[in-house]
């Protein structure tokens, strides 16, 4: 059991995030709605009568992908599941003039409403207008805002943590208790654990602590929305707000960038207590931080298949000071060399399957975060040198306290009363396992050797 557990944890290190999702044109799931936008409206003739059968074409001006729809009997249309971006919209019906709307900029969660009136036309005629988003969306009640790509690229963010820009909104604060993690507190007096974190509409929260599971590199973030109060029905999980990150996709243009951010002790101001230690010669002021990486994206098949990837490495070299009574622990007092490094890899591929369906694949790898969590928790427990093997009891107990294995066994014989289930567990796991099974009605725990002897 312990070997299997270690193998599972090593697998998590190799693949820390893998997402494969379909976005369907007609029936869009709630999570897809949280990560996309939509265009809807009504089309009528010059006299106000509704027009069924009008072909609506929505063209992504950045990636070249196309989505189509047809107005229903009441003249209404709706094109959902659109990735945030810039679009062109066309309405066509034989015998009527064609109307084109250019440069419609959609952000995550937006429902863009556009009604048309088509006039009769005896010649090939078209009308082109410019799309403008409404200042206020009257159909929504939640208090939310979107931090756009322009804001992420132009506004300064400490350590390239894009989520720190969420403090532009009222009722939002940055979590300072975990300086190495990019987290946000949404709501007055709440903690990071009360905030729901989503990436492309899918959960990015750790079940145990509630904080973000993976940091998303700034180069991979297109935009993100922050919901503070009156959350829509598609959101849930926690009592605080919602932070929903939308990742970048490739376009029809090859684009990339390379970056390096550097900081040392001359660019950093120490707090008063640290400065007093430095002045007294009890602290080492040396500090250096490098953050560098690259991002690249483009088409594999124009208007059909695109990719985007980025890699970011952060290396911090510093010294920390330990203040203890020198007469008791002289070897522990002084300044010691420290530091850390983090690698984050991100890749996303988008494929337009047809006019109503698209597919995307996302991969995120941040092994140092999971490595630290494992080494300080299960790894340390498994290395426990005590003869009683308390560390093994801890690992085994944690895996069984959630009743996962026991629930699987109950489900196995629920449909067949009187059936026998053979379970193979480790010796340190067995006391927990037997205790939990013994609490169930109608379950007898027996030794497999006795059963085999009777045979």
Image (cartoon, rainbow, N blue to C red):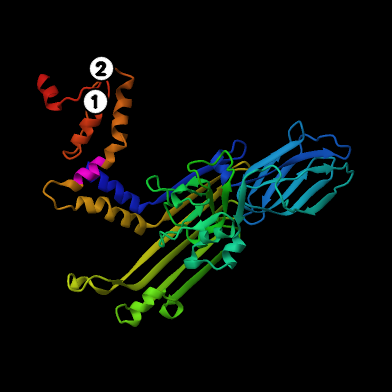
Which part of the image, by quadrant, shows the C terminus? top left
Q: Secondary structure at mark 2?
A: loop
Exactly how many numbered labels are in the figure? Answer: 2
Q: Residue at x 49, y 65 (%)?
A: 160
Provide the residue designation for mark 1: 421
Q: Is residue 318 magenta?
A: no
Question: Residue 108, how many percent across, how many down?
Answer: 61, 50
Question: Residue 382, how many percent across, how many down?
Answer: 20, 50
Which part of the image, by quadrant, shows the N terminus? top left
Provide the residue designation for mark 2: 418
- In the rendered view, does 296 fall on the left or right side of 69? left
Residue in front for this viewpoint, 202 or 88:
202
- In the rendered view, does 282 fall on the left or right side of 330? right
> Does residue 314 appear in the picture of this structure?
yes
* Image quadrant in which you'd find residue 318: bottom left
Residue in front for this viewpoint, 401 or 255:
401
The residue range painted magenta reads 392-397
């Amino acid at each position: 059991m312990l070997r299997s557990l270690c193998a599972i944890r090593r697998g998590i290190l190799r693949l820390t995030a893998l997402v494969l999702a379909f976005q369907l044109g007609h029936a869009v799931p709630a999570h897809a709605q949280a990560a996309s936008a939509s265009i809807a409206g009504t089309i009528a003739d010059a006299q106000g009568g509704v027009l069924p059968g009008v072909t609506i074409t929505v063209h992504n001006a950045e990636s070249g992908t196309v989505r189509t729809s047809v107005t229903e009997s009441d003249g209404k249309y709706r094109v959902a599941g659109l990735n945030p971006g810039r679009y062109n919209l066309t309405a066509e019906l034989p015998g009527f003039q064609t109307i084109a709307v250019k440069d419609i900029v959609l952000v995550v969660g937006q429902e863009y409403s556009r009604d048309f009136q088509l006039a009769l036309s005896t010649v090939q005629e078209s009308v082109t207008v410019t799309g403008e988003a409404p200042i206020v969306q009257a159909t929504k009640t939640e208090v939310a805002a979107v931090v756009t790509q322009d804001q992420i690229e132009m506004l300064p963010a400490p350590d390239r943590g894009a989520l720190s820009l969420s403090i532009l909104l009222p009722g939002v604060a940055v979590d300072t208790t975990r300086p190495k993690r990019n987290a946000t507190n949404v709501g007055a007096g709440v903690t990071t654990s009360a905030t729901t974190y989503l990436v492309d509409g899918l959960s990015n929260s750790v079940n145990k602590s509630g904080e973000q599971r993976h940091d998303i590199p700034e180069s991979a973030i297109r935009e993100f929305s922050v919901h503070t109060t009156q959350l829509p029905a598609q959101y849930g999980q926690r009592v605080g707000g919602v932070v929903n990150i939308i990742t970048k996709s490739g376009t029809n243009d090859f684009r990339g960038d390379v970056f390096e951010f550097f900081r040392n002790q001359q660019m950093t101001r120490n707090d008063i207590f640290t400065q007093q230690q430095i002045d007294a010669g009890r602290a080492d002021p040396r500090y250096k931080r490098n953050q560098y990486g690259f991002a690249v994206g483009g088409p594999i098949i124009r208007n059909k298949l695109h990719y985007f990837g980025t890699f970011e490495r952060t290396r911090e070299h510093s010294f920390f000071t330990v203040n203890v009574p020198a007469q008791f622990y002289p070897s522990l007092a002084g300044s010691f060399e420290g530091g850390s490094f983090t690698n984050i890899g991100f890749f996303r591929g988008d494929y337009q399957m047809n006019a109503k369906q698209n597919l995307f694949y996302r991969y995120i790898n941040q092994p140092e975060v999971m490595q630290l969590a494992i080494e300080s928790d299960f790894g340390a427990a498994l290395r426990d040198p005590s003869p009683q093997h308390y560390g093994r009891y801890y690992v085994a107990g944690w895996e069984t306290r959630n009743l996962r294995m026991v629930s699987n066994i109950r489900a196995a014989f629920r449909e067949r009363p009187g059936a026998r289930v053979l379970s193979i567990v480790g010796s340190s796991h067995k006391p927990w396992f037997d205790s939990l099974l013994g609490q169930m009605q109608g379950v007898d725990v027996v030794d497999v050797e006795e059963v085999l002897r009777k045979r």
